[in-house]
Amino acid sequence: MIKPLEALTKSDCQAVRYILTDVDDTLTWEGRLPTDSLVALEQLASRGLTVIPVTGGCAGWSDMMARTWPVAGVISEGGGVFIHKENSSSLTYQFWQDEALMTTQKTEMLAIVTLVLDRFPALRLARDQAYRLTDVAIDFAQDVRPPAIEAKEACLLALKELGLNAKASSIHINVSGEGYDKFAMAKRVLNHVYGLGDEGFAAQVMYVGDAPNDESMFERFPLSVGVANIAEHLPSMAYVPRFQTNFPGGFGFAELTQHLLSLR
């Protein structure tokens, strides 16, 4: 059973060093980044916490976040690539597999997805597809209005029947290569970039999310928090967060930040 945010105790918060967070409808709300979210990110960074957005968003968008937001780096395209500051002036891209191989796989997946979309006229490729390096995104609730939920579910099933690795976020269906997801890349980054062993995950890492494509993170990070809008997805989720905020999206993230910092 999910507990209210107020049940997150001082002992839960004391050892946290890393905040991993989804972006769409977790840091944002209704398509915008609230001031509250940006202030919260600044506060976490100023208190020495390492903040890493983990998003299904495109590498082009994530490059901007890694360069300009007060974050250590961004796990982008559902785990396909980690973009982070190598030093104060340049970024490093670390791909799950060889970059050229992942680019080829993306091109092959795009051809298949384009054919599938002919069967679902309510859906379309995400506007940011041109800025994606490793995956394919289908828009069902970002620029598609009203959200095409029934078509999304049918398309998701069709893609899986073709053997594609497809998952739904709050706005997109993301189609990616096999062998990785948000958690797989998060584990690699924490292990190899930050030197954190698996045994440190339970106490030192907190994950914040809002949708079914966050389940791999909710399953493996005990200190997990869902912002309030996760409520609509809970009936279809096998793994849910341990805590839930009172406010949605970025306002919930800011609520969590204030609660966390007040207990440290």
Image (tube, helix red, strand yellow):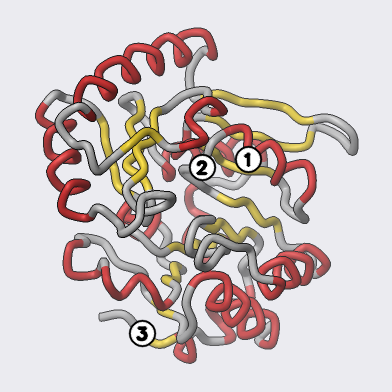
Identify the residue at horizontal 42%, vertical 27% (top origin).
135
Task: Judge the density around disc 2: few (<14), some (14-19), many (≥20) Cα neighbours within 10 Å.
Answer: many
Marks 3,1: beta carbons within 8 A: no
Q: Amino acid at mark 3?
A: Lys
Q: Residue furthest left?
A: 161
Residue marked by disc 1: 62
Q: Is residue 134 above or below residue 15?
A: above
Identify the residue at horizontal 24%, vertical 69% (top origin).
234
Q: Quadrant of residue 74?
A: top right
Marks 1,2: beta carbons within 8 A: yes
Residue marked by disc 2: 57
Residue marked by disc 3: 3
Seen from the viewer's position, the closer of residues 121 and 88 is: 121
Left or right: 164 with respect to 37?
Answer: left
Residue 149 position in % (x across, y down): 22, 55
Q: Earlier in the sequence, mark 2 or mark 3?
A: 3
Q: Amino acid at mark 2?
A: Gly
Identify the residue at horizontal 62%, vertical 70% (top origin).
15
Residue 232 visible here: yes
Residue 216 visible here: no
